[in-house]
Image (tube, helix red, strand yellow):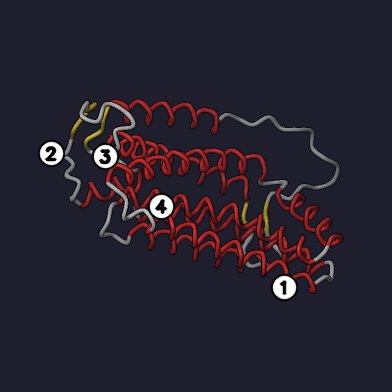
Amino acid sequence: MLVSNALIGLREGLEAALVVVILVAFLVKTDRRWALRQVWTGVAAAVLLSVAVGAVLTFGTRQLSFETQELIGGSASILAVAFVTAMVFWMRTAARTISGELKGKLDQALSVGGWAVALVGFLGVGREGLETALFFYASVQTAGSGTSQPLIGFVLGIVVAVVLGVLIYRGAVRINLSKFFRYTGVALVVVAAGILSYGIHDLQEAGFLPGLNTLAFDVSGAVPPGSWYGTLLKGTVNFTPATTWLQAVAWTLYLVVVMTFFLRPARTAPAPAGPTPATVGTPR
């Protein structure tokens, strides 16, 4: 789970970091530093809310019955898949326009007041934070108790994202967002397919979906769950040695359909007048 969680943490963390970089750079360059405090207030509130939601989901369900935990865990996994699917498709088209959209919203908020500026920061970071909290809970349910790999993976990914955000702001790093979100999007679609499979298995264990004992294959003898390669497959692509038919069908359909649409060339609108930068970086 370490690799897949680190990837999700990096992706979500970098999206949030880019939001903060764009907002802060815009205020500094337009000499409106007085609004920086409001932006950071909104960002801090979004982070606290995300941590609180993650903690409630992770620790607040432990006293429930096994079936109820599996029902909540499976539902959260499927909701996380819906979020990650929407995210990869949205960032596929928004990478080139996110800067202008955020600057426009912040410019409007500045004319309203400090609370509106804080709201822009809160909403910009809060969405990524809540998605991360949901992914974290789904990963904890998938990994099971007694392991800290989901937490370590998310922390590593987020730390790297924060470092990249600082470097981008200082102009030390420039990232081609279109390529970055395309490559990480492909990896996340594979991860999401595994999360969907685990979510369906949880719902089967909860008795919400049928077919728990109808296996498509069982390779536990060749790929023991406790082996290093079994752990590696589970941590990278959420592979389950014993997979039900419903899991296998859902995994295959999701991967084929979503990957086909994601890799299909996007329709490009006529190029606007003037240069359109393909990279993000804020020279100081």
| Label 2 residue SS | loop
- Residue closer to the observer: 110 or 189: 110
Q: Nearer the viewer, mark 2 or mark 4?
A: 4
Sequence order check, earlier mark of 1 and 3: 1
On the image, numbered disc 1 is attached to which residue? 37
On the image, numbered disc 3 is attached to which residue? 240
| Label 4 residue SS | helix
Residue at left offset 71%, top offset 66% = 39
Give the answer, above or below, for where 86 lies relative to 12. Answer: above
How crowded pointer 1 is (Cα within 10 Å; few <14, some 14-19, many 20+) is rated as some
On the image, numbered disc 2 is attached to which residue? 221
222 vs 187, left or right, is left
Q: Nearer the viewer, mark 1 or mark 3?
A: 1
On the image, numbered disc 4 is attached to which residue? 137
165 vs 114, left or right, is left
The Cα–Cα distance between marks 2 and 4, rounded to whole angstroms, is 29 Å
How crowded pointer 3 is (Cα within 10 Å; few <14, some 14-19, many 20+) is rated as many
The Cα–Cα distance between marks 1 and 3, rounded to whole angstroms, is 47 Å
Give the percent coordinates (x, y) of residue 117.
Answer: 76, 62
| Label 1 residue SS | helix
Q: Nearer the viewer, mark 3 or mark 4?
A: 4
